[in-house]
Amino acid sequence: MPFNHNIKNYENPKRQYEEDVLVLENIDEVYKLVLHDDDIHTFDYVIDALIIACKHSPEQAEQCTMLVHFKGKCTVKTGSMDVLKPMHEKLISKQLTSEIV
């Protein structure tokens, strides 16, 4: 029987990987910044607010605005509380309804 070079030795791999590379122990909890729909502001107003407050691209801001309009709310950003809180405050200062969850 000839030796098959395609057989992989999974019991004794040549590379050893550290298991905790994918563990997110040192990263803050991930929160969501959720924007809620209202009947007051225009699409352009909300798009501009997302570009300014959340540093969205125009396309991303437009997509989020559409989701907010049709679904009632949308997660517009995820991250640590330190990152999201200033964005939330900017949205609130523009009379938009957002929350961090």
Image (tube, grey):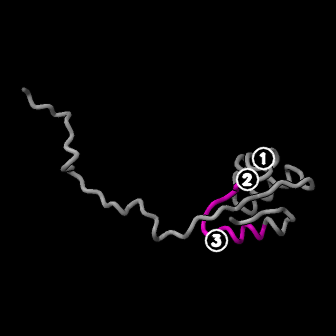
Which segment did they paint magenta?
A: 74-90
Q: Which mark is residue 74?
A: 2
Looking at this rendering, what residue extends furthest in the bottom direction? 82
- Mark 3 — residue? 81
- Horizontal side of 24 relative to 72 (left or right) equals left
Residue that appears at 91% across and 53% down: 39
Q: Which mark is residue 16?
A: none
Q: Separation of disc 2 and disc 1 at Cα?
A: 7 Å
Q: Are marks 2 and 1 in contact (CB under 8 Å)?
A: yes
Give the mark nearer the N terminus: 3 vs 2.
2
- Mark 1 — residue? 71
The amino acid beneath tag 1 is Lys
- Is residue 80 located in the magenta-colored stretch of the structure? yes
Neighbours of disc 1 within 10 Å: few (<14), some (14-19), many (20+): few
x%, y% of residue 57? 69, 52
Looking at this rendering, what residue extends furthest in the left direction? 1
- Horizontal side of 76 relative to 15 (left or right) equals right
- Is residue 43 located in the magenta-colored stretch of the structure? no
Q: Quadrant of residue 37?
A: bottom right
Q: Secondary structure at mark 3?
A: helix
Residue that appears at 76% across and 61% down: 52
Q: Secondary structure at mark 2?
A: strand
Give the mark nearer the N terminus: 1 vs 3.
1
Neighbours of disc 3 within 10 Å: few (<14), some (14-19), many (20+): some
Neighbours of disc 2 within 10 Å: few (<14), some (14-19), many (20+): many
